[in-house]
Amino acid sequence: MKKIFVSGCYDIIHAGHVQFFAEARALGDHLTVCFASDEVLWHHKERRSSLPQDHKLELLRSMSVVDDVVIGESEEMGLDFQDHFRRVKPDILAVTEDDQYEALKEALCDEVGAKYVRLPKTPPQFKTVSTSGIVKWIKAPDRSPVRVDFAGGWLDVPKFARQRAFIVNCAVSPTVSLQDWPYEKQSGLGGSGAWALLNGESGVTSELELGVGWQDPAIISETGLCVWKSGPVPELALKRDGEILQGKMAVYYTGTDHDTPGVVDQDRDYDLIEKAGAVAADAVEGNDLQRLGEAVRISYQVQLHEGMQPLPEVDTAISWKYTGGGFGGYALYLFAEQTARDAFVSQSDAALPIEPYLSQVR
């Protein structure tokens, strides 16, 4: 009888594990699966097991491709299974190609007289997932706000960051979900950051990988009306609940897509952007809506100088600007009174009322 042995954390058992077990079992006649005990998992991963180990034991035992299941209790990193391995004396230790403890496991195989077999990466029978990915998915929120920015945009892009400069933005509702997205796509409302958050991913990482800034996922995760310090990573300087914006904001869809990555390196007036951010930061500190409107007007002047098309003028609005720098998507309109905001929305099919959003759960 040719005995096969595999080991791993198998913290949340998924179809990828089943496929690996089947491919390992095909190498011989008997498959032993060893999984890390709760204590070992805590020691190695610094988190508790997602399933109690007695439940995990029964789940693995129930699989037709598995002949025996043991629990690894050695605390040596990468070799929690070694005591069982020496007892079973298998013919083959099967591992995946990307096993990070290859040298230790090969030495153990030499000691026991087992063959070390790397299973090639075969096309997955199922969508590829990982235990950490499942944990992220479980922790992901069901809904997310999007955002509007008032001033300082582009100074959240690490290569354009300036000391003592500020980015000011606000998380807003209606919120979005993977099934319900009431806004146009590619619209300059931080949708990519919200999408990453809803899928359990790090929005900041994904945005920086696109070559753009971190402000969208930062404010979407933080919520509220926020002032951020310009720099390579998000650093919150001031946060308010956004009450001064209640009933005072609307977005207007311009009818064209917004593409921030495509215009990152375009020439623009960063001195004026920094000035707008400073005015906006001062406005948030003083809870001054008119002062915030001034910052929005400065930001809009930057956008016009950059070549963006003029937005429709609205006499009843304090100020307006594109929500982002992608030459399209939504524009933000700021009003002094809710009656003026509501009248604007009622007169335009392209307009939508929005409200500041502050999460009560942190």
Image (cartoon, grey):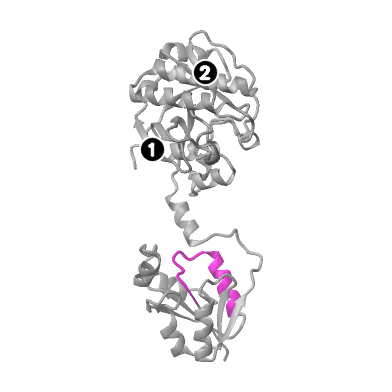
* Above-or-below relation of 67 to 162: below
Q: Residues within 10 Å of mark 1 (few under 14, many from 20)?
A: some
Task: In this rendered view, identify the residue nearer to me: 170 or 27.
Answer: 170
Task: In this rendered view, identify the residue nearer to me: 164 or 89.
Answer: 164
Q: What is the x, y in percent for residue 46?
A: 37, 64
Which three-letter amino acid code belongs to the residue tagged 2?
A: Trp
Which three-letter amino acid code belongs to the residue tagged 1?
A: Leu
Q: Residue at x 37, y 62 (%)?
A: 47
As measured in the structure, the alpha-carbon distance from the residue carrying label 2 to the one carrying label 1 is 25 Å
Which residue in the structure is indicated by mark 1? 236
- Of the 4 image quadrants, the one containing the N terminus is bottom right
* Above-or-below relation of 115 to 197: below
Task: In this rendered view, identify the residue nearer to me: 331 or 36.
Answer: 331
- State the image quarter where residue 211 is shown: top right
- State the image quarter where residue 41 is shown: bottom left
Label located before the other in sequence (2 or 1):
1
Q: Residue at x 61, y 82 (%)?
A: 27
Which residue in the structure is indicated by mark 2? 320
The span shown in magenta is: 7-25
Q: Residues within 10 Å of mark 2 (few under 14, many from 20)?
A: many
* Above-or-below relation of 279 to 19: above
Task: In this rendered view, identify the residue nearer to me: 56 or 244.
Answer: 244
- Of the 4 image quadrants, the one containing the C terminus is top left
Q: Is residue 115 magenta?
A: no
Element type at mark 2: strand
